[in-house]
Amino acid sequence: ELRPTSHKSRSLDCKICEHIATIKSASLVRSSLEHEQDFELREQMSGYKRMRRQHQKQLIALENRLKAEMDEHRLRLQKELETHANNTYIELERLAKRHAAQTDKEMKSVAAEERRIQQQIVAQQKKELTTFLENQKKEYRLCKDKIKEEMNEDPCTPKEEKQERLSRHKETIQRSQAEEEAHLLAQQRLVYDRSCRALKRRSLVRRHEFEQEQLREELNKKRTQKEMEHALMIRQDESTQDLERRQLQMLQKLRVELMRLQHQTELENQEEYNGRRQRELHRKHSLEQRQQPRNLKTLEMQIKKQFQDTCKVQNKQYKALRNHQLEVSPKGDHKTILKSLKEEQTLFPPCHFLLLV
């Protein structure tokens, strides 16, 4: 009697059919596993390469940032040095202008003092010359009066002779006074020249001392500026060394961290690979254990077939040898030959040949 199938039985049949449809062969499963393993290995290698590229980008980015920081630091130090040099130049220019003004003022003061002293000397000499000339005039009048008195006391002397004697006395007195005046002028000129030379020497010494003082002040200023520049360069060098040390520490720290991550990734990949290989070996070992009875049967069948083939070959060889011996030997020896061949066949069974093979 035919009965209609229920809904549950139809769903069970569908599930059985689907289960049967999903059964795959061992080679297909093996190739699928190998494909998955290759895919995982490629993904692992690509991830490792991607990590290495990312690490390289991080190192390059840090190096570029540190290089930009170092360039900015050096530019700032260069500007600081230039500012110090400009300030030094401005201060030295200001000092030079002040020295020039002081020198000009000092030279004007020295020149004014020289003119004043020279004017004093000239005035003093003029006064002396005026006094000297007045004294000469008085002396000339006294001498003239004295000669006249002497001539008046001698009435016997002719008038012409008196005039001649008076003229000679006048000439003598005038010549003597002229010589004394010339001597006085020469003495005054000598004194004036000596005074001028003394003033010039004193002014030159004073100017030299003034220039020496200004030069010492300028040298002290330059030495102070150089010491400040030297201290600034030492401080800049120390700051540069500190920055380089800090940057190297940052680079080293990043390299160590990236190396640690790389080693950690390599270790994880190796552990994952070892686990996968261990699972594969375990699965292969389990499969071999399950397939061992089947393999033994297959091996037994192979041995039996090899034994049968060996027996067939041996029989063919025996028949060929027997026919050859019978053909080449006389008929009277056939019985003996057959007997010896049977004995050899008994002594060397097929299993012996199998072992030899």
Image (cartoon, rainbow, N blue to C red):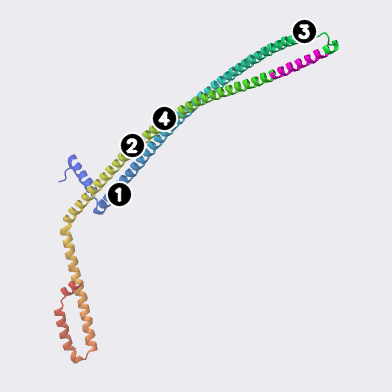
Is residue 177 within the magenta segment? Answer: yes
Q: Are marks 2 and 4 in contact (CB under 8 Å)?
A: no
Q: Which residue is mark 4?
A: 231
Mark found first going from the N terminus, 4 or 1 = 1
Q: Alpha-carbon distance for marks 4 and 1?
A: 66 Å
Residue 38 - label: 1
Mark 4 vs mark 1, foreground winner is 4
The amino acid beneath tag 1 is: Asp
Mark found first going from the N terminus, 1 or 3 = 1
Pick the front one: 181 or 317: 181
Q: Are marks 4 and 1 in contact (CB under 8 Å)?
A: no
Answer above or below: position of 221 versus 330: above
Residue at 85 percent across and 10 percent down: it is 159
Q: Alpha-carbon distance for marks 4 and 3?
A: 99 Å
Answer above or below: position of 276 versus 199: below
Residue 131 - label: none
Residue 149 - label: 3
Mark found first going from the N terminus, 2 or 1 = 1
Counting from the top left corner in percent of width and height, residue 81 is at 46, 29
The amino acid beneath tag 2 is: Gln
Answer above or below: position of 196 versus 17: above
Q: Alpha-carbon distance for marks 2 and 1?
A: 41 Å
Q: Residues within 10 Å of mark 2 (few under 14, many from 20)?
A: few
> Does the image show residue 83?
no
Mark 1 vs mark 3, foreground winner is 3
Residue 249 - label: 2
Q: Are marks 2 and 3 in contact (CB under 8 Å)?
A: no
Magenta range: 164-183
Q: Quadrant of residue 107?
A: top right
